[in-house]
Image (tube, grey):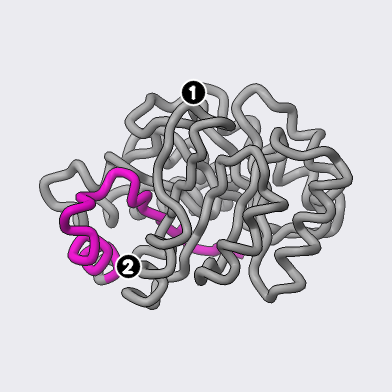
Amino acid sequence: MFQPVKIAPSILSANFMNLEADIDRIAKAGAGYVHVDVMDGHFVPNLTMGVPLLKQLSKATDVPMDVHLMISNPLVQIPWFIAAGADIITFHAEAVTEEEMVEAVRLIHEAGVKAAVSVKPKTPVEVLRPVIADVDMVLVMSVEPGFSGQSYIEGSDVKVAQVVAMAREAGNEPLIQVDGGIGVKTAPLVAAAGADVLVCGNAVFAAEDPAAALRAVEDAANEARLAALAKQGA
């Protein structure tokens, strides 16, 4: 059954001097989530935003807060972001052991928050197996995490399809999110492969009309998804 693709604009590419207005603009355009990139300068070579900003963001809009933790100690910090108002928390499989991955998902769920796990471009999807039956979302990175504005890594759509197949095998249908170099040209590739949520940074916020850019990516993705479903006979 067709489920429309949702866009999660990454505020890392927004105007921090006018953040509330930028969020209001994408909310009115129909953004499915506000994507909050948290980087610690250790797990990835960049330092961005944290708990104080998320607390303010969660009060400023009704759009769900999609918090992407690119940090080396997620088990320590997950409770902080739960308390700050996260609706979905994504941590990286590369930052934890198998046991810690299971524990992180449990910790997030116990707080009534949706749990997601992410894999970098070079990480095989097999690492997700311990939690694939339990997570609410899987984030497939289509660039190396750390900086916005990078180009989409070809073949990321194949990885999306692999995650979809693994989840179905486990009896789960988590949202599949893709982050990195997503725009009008690349959104159809991952949407056709099964992506449900697309993170867009510069493709939205660097556009002359961010609202129109968001809708253009959304339309391109949904057109490709419909075509893929028709081809499958769904």
Q: Is residue 51 above or below residue 150?
A: below
Residue 81 colored in magenta in the image: no
- Which residue occupies 56% across, 41% down? 70
> Residue 217's spot in the image, x, y percent?
33, 48
Residue 111 left/right relative to 68: right
Indicate which disc residue 95 carries.
none
Q: Which residue lies at the image location 60% right of the left edge and 47% below the top edge?
A: 194
Residue 3 seen in the figure: yes
- Residue beneath disc 1: 153
Q: Residue at x 74, y 34 (%)?
A: 125
Q: Determine which quarter of the picture holds residue 46.
A: top left
Looking at the image, which is closer to me, 77 or 230? 77
- Circle 2 sits on which residue? 30
206 relative position to 142: left or right: left
Say which quarter of the image contains residue 158: top right
Q: Amino acid at mark 1?
A: Ile
Q: Which residues are magenta?
A: 1-27
Q: Quarter of the image containing the C terminus?
A: bottom right
**Image coords of residue 95 (percent x, y):** 70, 36
Nearer-N-terminus badge (1/2): 2
Quadrant position of residue 196 = bottom right
Spatial CA distance of label 1 from label 2 is: 27 Å
**Image quadrant for the N terminus?**
bottom right
Query: What residue is drawn where x is 83% and y is 38%?
Result: 97
Above or below 11: residue 82: below
